[in-house]
Amino acid sequence: MKISKSRIIKNQVFKGLLVLSALLVILPLILVFIFLLQKGSTSISLDFFLNDPKPVGEVGGGMRHAILGTLIMVSIGSLIAVPVGTLCGVYLSEYGKGKIATSLRFTIDLLTGVPSIVVGIFSYLIFVVSFKSFSALAGAFALSIIILPIVTRTTEEILKLIPRHVREAGLALGLPRWRVIYNIILKGSRNSLMTGVILAISRAAGETAPLLFTAFGSMYMSYNVAGPMASLPVQIYNYAISPYKEWQQQAWAGSFTLIIIVLGLNLSAKFLFNSKKLKKFFARKS
Amino acid sequence: MNILKKLRPASPSKQDKLAYITLRFFSLIVIVLLILMVGQLFYASREAFSEFGFKFITDDFWNPIDDEFGALPFIFGTVVTSLLALLIAGPVSISVALFITEYLPKGISGILGTFVELIAAVPSIIFGLWGLYYLAPFVKEMLTPALKATLGFLPLFQGPSFGIGILTASIILAIMIIPTITSVAREVFRSINILHKEAALGLGATKFEMIKIAVLRPSFSGIVGALVLGLGRALGETMAVAMVIGNTPQISKSIFAPASTMASVMANEYAEAESDLHLSALCLVGLLLFVVTFVVNLVARTIVWKQTKGVSK
């Protein structure tokens, strides 16, 4: 059978368009990388990690306070959100029926879709208004609301991959259900559960909007969680929109650091998690 | 019966109950958290609502100095940038999803998929920085003259360009929502029955025709769902937009003009709001944004869920 020429041409043109769109999608990512490498890497030095900022005009200074601030707030945020998120995920995968489970699923869906700036306002209303001061705690709370739904989601998805017969085998051995869940299901998939946590943390580390009016930012090193605290993204924002060349330079260096942290976490999570491996692991064990 | 009772461990039911109650307790806490969030937003915005009522969303002046607030410019900015972003990102994302699912061999498709996912991982602030120092000059010097030369007879493409403005914000938004649309579209395409595809090929269709008949047509509603989900993300995106849109509360015919979105006005004014009414008005904007993204996400999820459940296997 002969295929008419116009059909072949259409086919080829279509394929060409698809290839073009694939290139178009990757292009901005590459451009962002080149931009950050060009501008950021040249202004990065050891000083940048070891010093606090200096006033405009003075040479040097770094973002030590902001890097540590991000670290502190993300840590507190995940300390709140990871246990709660994991428990919710377990509830959804192991018991997930009935009214509460349905509303929880709905809630998690909604929380994923809530714009992060709205989360920031909520945290502001709860913490900053009642304590009358911007605080790192308020920022950490906002970040925990960002982390929570991601952890719950991934926990549920990962636990659902575990075949039923693993649970049945545990129960048949006479183990109570909570032991089956804790010792077999949770411990067995510990590594994959970590990926969800890492992904959530990498997401939270780059969040700016919810920190703008909760942690607010600061130019000094601070360990006081009840007061304002700098964070890498907010510092980048403040520097980027400033009119000073030195500060803009700092913003690029900060972005370079931030993207390496975030993408590093992201890729390592991807490397850790392999659902096929998980399935195989449980198939062998039982 | 007796033997069975003896074999049963001491009292697992009590511990099991405790574990179950704990899980339920934390689940309830999360649900309450969301209710609290909505409640707080309502409570904090009541002052502005009682002052302006529904005129808040139809009035187009925003003047913190005289305590006059109308959110129309921000609603306009949000809607226009999001729709424009969807217009740019939609065709591209769906093409990429098709390319990954239908054309690429498994190994390479994984790599391209990872690349697309990496875009979603890049923090918003970095896109903002890039947009401010790289994309905005590009738009001003290259894109604007080109658009003016070809489509300049439309009011959409007239007026001066400062680089920052609706167009630049839309391009950044488009880049940021491509991963969302692509991943959902991939899921939709994957749920298509392979027999239909084989049937189309067996009848002598070219690959393009097969995709048109057996892939795109049955997944139409799923694609719409993916687009709506992308729209939901674009509506709430804050930092990148705040950095490149110019932050001017105005409604303009030209897409080169600076504007402001609901998210960006909150980011810009919240920490500096002085009067209670100003703060309350910003909360009302937040509440509006919350409600809109909620509805949009709900619609999208329902469509996508129906598509991937209904057609699969």
Image: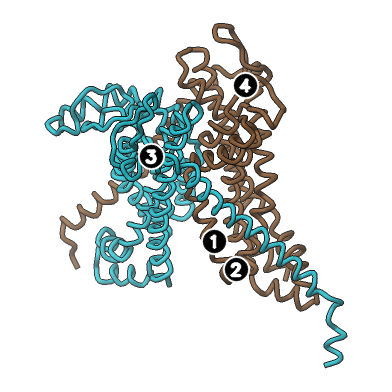
What residue appears at the point 19 percent right and 58 percent down from the top-left corner? A7
Q: Which amino acid does label 2 sit on?
A: Gly
Residue B291, given in percent of the width and then of the height, sits at: 41, 50
Q: Name the residue under label 3.
A: B51
- The mark lying in front, picked from 1 and 3, is 3
Visual hue assigned to chain A = brown
- The mark lying in front, picked from 4 and 3, is 3
The answer to whether the residues at label 4 and label 1 have Cβ atoms under 8 Å apart is no
Q: What residue type is labelled 3?
A: Glu
The answer to whether the residues at label 4 and label 2 have Cβ atoms under 8 Å apart is no
- The mark lying in front, picked from 2 and 3, is 3
In this rendering, the answer to whether B40 lies above or below A65 is: below
Position of the N terminus of chain B, as image quadrant, is bottom right
Pointer 1 and pointer 3 on the same chain: no
Q: Secondary structure beneath disc 1?
A: helix
The answer to whether the residues at label 1 and label 2 have Cβ atoms under 8 Å apart is yes
Residue B281, given in percent of the width and then of the height, sits at: 42, 37
Q: For residue A283, what is the image quadrant?
A: bottom right
Q: Which amino acid does label 4 sit on?
A: Met
Q: Name the residue under label 1.
A: A105
Q: Residue furthest front?
A: B51
Residue B249, given in percent of the width and then of the height, sits at: 32, 30
Residue B178, given in percent of the width and then of the height, sits at: 39, 45
Separation of disc 4 and disc 1 at Cα?
A: 40 Å
Pointer 2 and pointer 3 on the same chain: no
What is the chain letter for disc 4? Answer: A
Q: Which amino acid does label 1 sit on?
A: Arg
Q: Name the residue under label 2.
A: A96
Q: Secondary structure beneath disc 3?
A: helix
**Which chain's colour is cyan?**
B
Pointer 4 and pointer 3 on the same chain: no
Separation of disc 4 and disc 3 at Cα?
A: 44 Å
